[in-house]
Structures are given as structure tokens and as C-alpha cells.
Image (cartoon, rainbow, N blue to C red):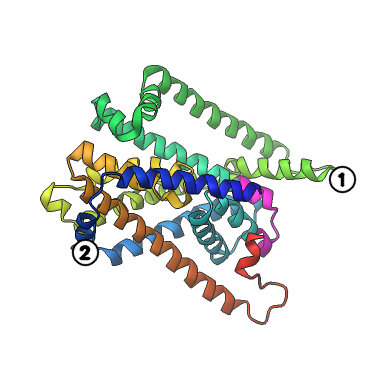
Amino acid sequence: MKKILHLLAGVLVAALFIWLSLRDADLSELARQLGGIRYGWLLPFLGIVLLGNYLRAERWKMVLDDESGLSHSRLQLFTGLMYGLTANVVVPRAGEFLRALYVSRHTGMETSRLFGTIVLERVLDMLMMLIMLLVTVILLITDSRLLEQVFGREGAAYIGLLTSATGLTVIGLTILTGFGLLWYLRVRADKNPDKKTEAADESKITSLIKGFLRGVVAVRNLKNWPLFVVYTILIWLGYVAMSLLPFYAFDFHITYDFGWIQAFVITVVGAVGVTLPSPGGIGTYHYLVQQGLFYLYGVPMMTALGYATVNHLANLFGILLIAAGLFVVNQRLIVGKPGTKIPFSELFR
């Protein structure tokens, strides 16, 4: 029942934002916009989807390898990641659990610990998105009315609070405290390398909680911080490039002189939409990107909605295509290995 309610809530959120996007829409104009786009950008777009998600899996491998002292299969981690992204299209955030479950069944690692590392990854990505949002607001959007038109009154108020002197101070102190805690945990772990973390009579719930917390703080064991940071920056540069390439589909680079700066801003606006509880960002992404293009750059509403629709569909198509390819590869690789073949449908039980 809880899963059904979660799914229904996500569908309702998506439906609300789809209605907001289409309430004054001229569907014939939207169809004309979609029918006249160029498709030469699609191939490099799909390449960036593949590369960006591979780098995300590689970054996750760094955390898991350094935390456990073992080397994990890139194929298994990449497959788990893509299966999770596919599941998120159906049920918001369900993919995080599926991803941890898939990798746990193939590697024997604790599901709770894997989920902890995924939460860690999400926290770091939220921090990166927050930094980009602050840059966008401070340097590019100086009119508070624009913020309200793009993000809504409550969203604009929240962003205004974050970018105020008090908000920036709290954010800075939180980041410093977090790094201080990680440093303390790293030093403590180095001083007590042989200390057991679980008692023999430890309850299952306590074990799950400890496994989860070990995953969350696994970043303390990273041996190559610069490479980890480079992966994170490259992942987000990929998102910006994915906003840039569809500009060429609609000739925005000619009509509006769009380039990397506009792609950076639209990436931030779209990222806010994806964080809302809608399946795969459906509706929320479309609405916020439409509002951003219209109010920030004067792109007509239908053209802006067409851009958001094409961008979202291309990304969704890329994810599904990669996940399907990995499913076929994994099924072929594990043929004849008893006990290792896990039907995809079983992971949703």
C-alpha cells in the first residue's frame, strides 16, 4: 500500500505540472515546433548520456573500492546505476533502492551499506547543484521578480534565503563541519584499523543502521580526492552539455545567441525540477524549464515547452537504451552460471 501511495503521489505531482505547462498551450503550435527540429545533435547527446552515467558509476566504484579495500565490477555497478535510473521513471526515488539491491545480490555487499553510499552521492550532488544555483542567482539573476516567476513565490523566497548573508554563512559552516567530521572519522579509523564495528549479538536493525552509516561516511576513506572531484565536475559539465546540444535542434544558437552560459542556467533550473517528487522529473522539469526560458530569455512558451519535451525525451530514451543494452549483455555473460541469474522483474518485489 505504501508503494502504491508513493506512486500515486508522484503521478499527481507530474499531472499538476503537466497541466501548468499545457493550460494555455496551443497544441498545434507545439506539434509544429516538434516536427521542425534538427536531429543532428541527438547522437552526441546520447554519447554524453552514456559517458556521464559511466563516470557516475566510476565515481561510485572509487567510494566502494576505497571503503572496502576490494575491487568491484564496473559492469555490475554501471548496470545497477542504469536499472535504478530506469526505475525512477516509474516511481520517484525507487531506483536508489533497486540500485543497491541489484549490486548487493551480485557482490554480496550489505544492501544498507550500498544505500548509504548512494545517499552520500546524492548529498554531494545536491551540494554541487546548490553551488551552481548560487552562482546563477548571484551572477546572472539579479531581479527577484524573475526568480518568483521561474521558481514560484515559495521557491524564490527559499532561494533568496539561501543566497542571503545568513544563508551563505550557515551553508559555509555546514560544509566546514561536514569536512571536519569526515577528517575526524578518517583519523579515528587510521588509529583503530583492527577495531571491530559489530558485536556478535548485534541485532539485525542495529546492523542495518551501522551498515547504512558506514556507507554514508565512506567518503572518509577516499584515497584520490582530486580524481573524485574531477569526476563530479565532469558529470555536471555533461549535464550542461545536455542542455546545450538541444539548442541546436531549435536554432537557439542563431535566434537567441544561446551558448554555454544559457545552458548552465537552464541546467540549474531543470535540476531543481528533477529534485521534485515526480516520476523521472516528468512535468516538473518541463514546467520549470519552460518558465526559465520564457521569463529569463524571452523564448515563446510553446517553443520553450518543445525544447523541454525534446530534451527530457532524449535523456529518457538514452537511459532506457543503455539499460536495455546492459540487460542483454548481463544475461549473455551469466548464462550457465547457476545462482547468479536474477530476472529483472524480481528486483521490484
Judged from this view, the residue extending furthest toward the bottom is 336
Crowding at mark 1 (Cα within 10 Å: few <14, some 14-19, many 20+): few
Q: Could you tell whether 302 is left or right of 327 in the image?
A: left
Question: How many dots with numbers?
Answer: 2
Crowding at mark 2 (Cα within 10 Å: few <14, some 14-19, many 20+): few
Please tell me the numbered disc located at residue 73.
Answer: none
Q: Could you tell whether 101 is left or right of 61 in the image?
A: right
In the rendered image, which residue does mark 1 sit on?
200
- Which residue appears at 35% of the width and 64% of the height? 47
In the rendered image, which residue does mark 2 sit on?
35
SS assignment for the magenta stretch, majority: helix
Is 79 situated above or below 336? above
| Label 2 SS | helix
Q: Nearer the viewer, residue 257 or 120?
A: 257
Q: Is residue 267 visible?
A: no
Q: Amino acid at mark 1?
A: Ala
- Which residue appears at 22% of the width and 45% of the height? 301
